[in-house]
Amino acid sequence: MTMKRQVFFLLIGAAFIILLISVSFFVYLKYKQRSLSKSNFKTLDQYIQQVPQEKLDKAITALKEELGKNPNFSEAHVALGMMYHKKDLLDDALTELKTALTINPDLGNVYKEMYLIYKKKGMEEEANQALDSYNKLKESK
C-alpha cells in the first residue's frame, strides 16, 4: 500500500471517529436538556401557583413575546397555559397545553393540568381521557 493511500485511510478513520464523538456528544446534550426540562416543570408549576394575580399579565406578555421569537418552545406554551388556567381563561389554557403536547408529547404533567381544566369545565369524558393519557405516559417511563 502506498503512503498516500495509508494517509487517506488514516484521515477517513479519524473523520469517522470525530463524527462518532460529535453524535455521541449531541445525544448526551439532548438527554441532559430533556431531563432538565422535566425537573424544571415541577418547580414551574409551584412557581406559577405563587405568582400574584396582578403579575400574571406581565408574565403572560413576556411569554407571548418569547413564543413570537420561538414558537416551538414547548415549556413556554405549558407555562402560558398554566397562567391562563390560573386566570380562568380555560379555553386559552387548553389551546396552549395542546400546542405544547404537539411539540413535545412527553410532557406528562400537561395531561394533569388538562385534567383539572376539563373537570372545571364539566367535561368528564375529556378529563378522564387526559388522566388516562397521563397514567399511560407515566407507566411507560
Image (spheres, rainbow, N blue to C red):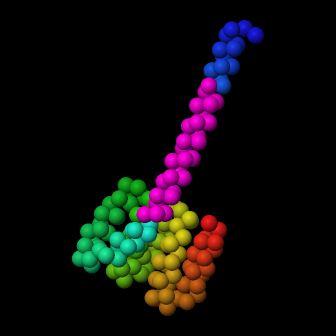
Residue at 39% x, 68% y: name it. 44
Q: Which residues are magenta?
A: 14-40
Question: Does residue 130 appear in this view?
Answer: yes
Left or right: 70, with 140 as reference point: left
On whether residue 35 falls in the magenta region, the answer is yes
Left or right: 79, with 122 as reference point: left
Tell me where residue 115 appears, x and y as whole percent: 51, 82
The front one of 41 and 64 is 41
Question: In which image quadrant can residue 92 be found?
Answer: bottom left
On whether residue 140 falls in the magenta region, the answer is no
User: Which quadrant holds the N terminus?
Assistant: top right
Q: Is the residue 132 above or below the residue 107 in the image?
A: below
Residue at 49% x, 63% y: name it. 38
Dominant secondary structure (helix, strand or loop) of the stretch shown in magenta? helix
Q: Is the residue 69 above or below the residue 45 in the image?
A: above
| Residue extending furthest toward the bottom | 122
Question: In which image quadrant can residue 46 be found?
Answer: bottom left
| Residue extending furthest toward the top | 2
Tell me where residue 136 appears, x and y as whole percent: 63, 74
